[in-house]
Amino acid sequence: MSSNTTINAEMLSRMFLAAAKNLDDKKEWINELNVFPVPDGDTGTNMTMTIMSAAREVAAIREPDMASLCKAISSGSLRGARGNSGVILSQLLRGFTRGVKEYDELNVSILTDAFQKAVETAYKAVMKPKEGTILTVAKGMADKALELNQSGVEDLASFMEEVIKTGDITLEHTPDLLPVLKEAGVVDSGGQGLMQVVKGAYDLFMGKEMDLTVVDIAQMNTPNGAGTMSSSAPLDGNYEAQANMNIKFGYCTEFIILLNKTFNIKMEMDFKSYLESIGDSIVCVADDDLVKVHVHTNDPGLAIQKALMYGMLSNMKIDNMRLEHEEKLFKMRQDGTYELREEEPAEEEKTEQPMEHKDTAFIATSVGEGMSEIFKGLGVDYIVEGGQTMNPSTEDFLSAIEKVNADTIFILPNNKNIIMAANQARDLTEDKQIIVIPTKTVPQGITAVINYIPDLSAEENESTMIEEISLVKTGQVTYAVRDTSIDGKEIKQGDYMGIGDSGMLAVGSSIPDVTFEMIRNMMEDDSELISIYYGAETSEEEAQALRDRVAVNYPSCDIELQAGGQPIYYYIVSVE
């Protein structure tokens, strides 16, 4: 497996799965480290979903070599990247794999070079790198690795131990580089997430017994979207559950494609998207010269015909799951005997109608039925479900881009933590013009759509929309989950907070009072429009009372009140 001076592909594979498992175990703790004490902490969740996207592909490789392992880690994390922290983690992993993929075994020197490439790749991916973040922690460990390598250290255990110690020290100093961390009394959550990744890998290398089956469980329960994969393990033992199974797709279809052309990420995405259109339980793992495919479908021939476009097929296996199911279709009685149970008919397969071709289309991230309806009413073609607690991944945007039949597509992320994932999807798209408007809030997204002018070019519209969203001020009202001090305001657990674009605007024990105070702090002499979107936990009567109060105090402004239906935030308000 490994020695004290080298790591082979099998060991690196297990170390990566252990890293993913350790991050998954610690994600809730990492979520709680966010600098704002609000119930939308998602750094741990975003990083975990990013690394698990790669871990599922790694787990599917039965006999890993360094090249296939690195491809699985790099492409899996890239497609599954969610939020800024997840995107940066994917770039760190991408850079690391570039440094090791050509070697059969890794030593201190190779790992040192890989750490340098990881940091270099991640810093390049961020337009304005900020110190005191995950980037700082990664750089601190890379610098220590270089120092140890130059001093002649060859023992991997000692090397990794010292690198991790330096990472912990660097993490502890992140509040000195980011005042908002010091004010909140926390270290950087992304940096802490990275440390859990490295520590998980180190623990397994040192011989710690770790349960890695969480990756297999994740394979069978992936949400719709990025990296959909599933286990085809036999269903033994639970007869009652099997008797109630409703098999939507009847044929378990497996084969290997022996590639006759380069299978790039775009091709892989297209092929997976096609498989998703004809079935489910999809596994598609690509190596340099072959692709392993598993899909449940009602028409195996369609999957086979599509696969033949990329090369010859081998190891083909098609099982009729409905027949197998009938053989097991017995239900256990309470007395331990079995009774035959009639199988319910499968639902008719629903096919998604292709969208009509357009020259220009819009994709927007939205959360809450009301917000989504507003965007649809303004002409947005596709809604990507997202928000604070579940950031869309790069592959979610790629999937949306694939479904939208237009030459030019504007993407409105509507959340600063989603912009990087949208940008990565843009960079991976070759056959359409993708323009990401950097909207950080839903009101900015609404303003961007309203200011689109069909007669202008895409570039002119981009410029206009960016200029207009810069004039929109946004405030959001939620509640605190812990005591802290932000922007000079003392906040107690359970207080309500009005958070503006640049910091805390109001704190108190009354939602209407906090919201009104927040609006007051957003107003300027030339403000003309106040838009109020009330959330899922706010009644229409309460929202109308707030609107009336605002109207009395600002009679010269137009005031719009709409049901947003958003979770977490009682009100989202924009002032223009």
Image: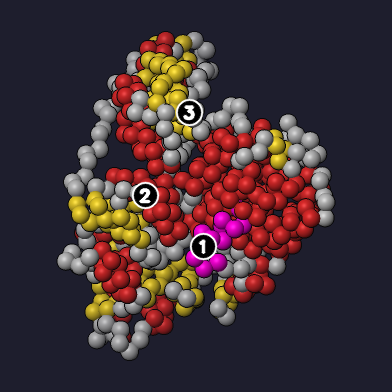
Q: Tell me which label, 3 or 1, sits earlier in the chain.
A: 1
Q: Which mark is residue 126?
A: 1
Q: Is residue 103 visible to us here?
A: yes
Q: Which mark is residue 249?
A: none
Magenta stretch mostly in which secondary structure? helix
Residue on which disc 2 sits: 429
Please tell me how crowded label 2 is: few (under 14), some (14-19), or many (20+) other residues with Cα within 10 Å.
some
Residue on which disc 3 sits: 290
User: Amino acid type of disc 3?
Assistant: Leu
Q: Position of residue 29 (x, y in %)?
A: 62, 54
Magenta-drawn segment: 118-129
Considering the numbered disc 2 on the image, is that residue within a helix, a strand or a loop? loop
Do residues under tags 3 and 1 come within 8 Å of each other at their CB atoms?
A: no
Considering the numbered disc 3 on the image, is that residue within a helix, a strand or a loop? strand
**Which of the two residues, 263 or 221, is positioned nearer the viewer here?**
263
- Residue 518 occupies quadrant: bottom left
Q: Quadrant of the C terminus?
A: bottom left
Q: Position of residue 311 (x, y in %)?
A: 40, 26
Q: In the image, is residue 4 above or below residue 547? A: above
Instruction: Inspect the magenta stretch and tell me whether residue 126 lies in it.
Output: yes
